[in-house]
Each structure stands twice: as C-alpha cells, then as structure tokens.
Image (tube, grey):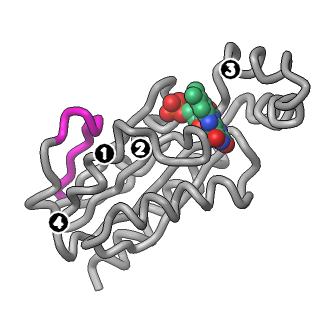
Amino acid sequence: MKVLVTYYSDTGNTKKIASAIYDVIDTDKEIKAVQDIESAAGFDLVFCGFPVHAHSVPSKAIDFIKQLPQGQKVAFFSTHGSQRGGQLPKQAFEHAISLAVKANILGHFGSRGQVNQKVIDMLLKSPEHKAWGEEAQSAIGHPDEHDLADARKFAAEMIAKARN
Ligand SMILES: Cc1cc2nc3c(=O)[nH]c(=O)nc-3n(C[C@H](O)[C@H](O)[C@H](O)COP(=O)(O)O)c2cc1C
C-alpha cells in the first residue's frame, strides 16, 4: 500500500499534525505540501490536511481536493482555532467532502491550532468579534502532545480501514 500525506499550512500547526500522521504509517509513504503535489494518482490512501479559514477550506487546498480521482481513498484532517467538536470546524469538513465528489472518504480528524497573534489582536479590538477572539486565544499551545497522540490514533484507524 502506498500512502500520501499532504497538507496546506501557513503557521505550521497543520504540518505538525501531518508529521504525526506520517510517523505512524508503516508502509510505502510520502509527505508533501499540497502546493507541491500535482495529482494523487498512484496512491492507495491520501491524508489531506488544511487549516480552517473563515469556517471553510483555504483556496490553496481546494484545487487539490477537487481533482481527487474516482474512488480515491481519502482521510481529511484540519486544525482550527475554535473548540474541538464545534459546528464550524465540522462545516469545513463538510465542504471538503462536497468538493471531493468522486473520492471515497474514510474519515476526518480535527485538532485545535494556535491562532496567529495578529489575527487575535484584530479580533479582540472589534466588539463584534471579541467573543471569537477570546475563543481563538484559548487555542494557545495547540496542537499539543494530546492532539498529536489523537492524530496518530486516527491515522492508524484510517490505515486499517483502507486495508479492508
Ligand atoms: C485568515 C485566517 C482565518 C481563520 N479562520 C478560522 C475560522 O474560521 N475558524 C477557526 O476555528 N479558526 C480559524 N483560523 C485559525 C486557524 O485555522 C488555526 O490557527 C490553524 O491551526 C492554523 O493552521 P496552520 O498553522 O497550519 O496555518 C483562521 C486563521 C487565519 C490566519
């Protein structure tokens, strides 16, 4: 089995999750930024990760997701400033799944990711965005060791699923 881990990451959080996933893959594997990948052809399983931007998928990951081949086994992962299990990060996965029209989605995993301080400062200044700014601020230190352990567990589950 040949596995690709690909990710888009601005400030390194999604890349950290990608590396944790990559570490547990016990077969032929490759890890690359999504900008450096032309196609997923030839891979039995693709892990594809992105940071949630404006409740959705950043444009740099969209083109890759859209061209995932027919029947391609895919596991999505993301990082986001908001709390885990919330509705908004779930929406971003739903959007990613809707873009991967022909692919076979095996599952998805989300982790909190520390938010750029400039973004937080901007949010805290605006009364309208203050609550979200405070939530974003509480993601400091993520992804942490627990998040990385959860990512490894997710990766092992997806690999087992892909082999079935
Ligand atoms: C422009 C921008 C928009 C963002 N929008 C959201 C959002 O809508 N929801 C959220 O939970 N986090 C949001 N975040 C926080 C990022 O998703 C989070 O910090 C992520 O871990 C960054 O990943 P990276 O280091 O791989 O780039 C945003 C960050 C930026 C810079």
Quadrant location of residue 128?
Answer: top right
Name the residue tied to disc 2.
18
Q: What residue type is labelled 1?
A: Thr
CB within 8 Å, label 2 to label 1? yes
Name the residue tied to disc 4.
69
Quadrant location of residue 26?
Answer: bottom left
Name the residue tied to disc 3.
119
How far apart in space, not on screen, are marks 1 and 4 (Cα)?
15 Å
Question: Residue at left 14%, top 50%?
Answer: 39
Is label 3's Cβ within 8 Å of ligand 1?
yes
How far apart in space, not on screen, are marks 4 and 3 (Cα)?
36 Å
Question: Residue at left 40%, top 70%?
Answer: 158
Question: Residue at left 59%, top 56%?
Answer: 150
Figure check: 27 above or below 8: below
Name the residue tied to disc 1.
6
Tell me where residue 43 appears, x and y as whole percent.
Answer: 15, 61
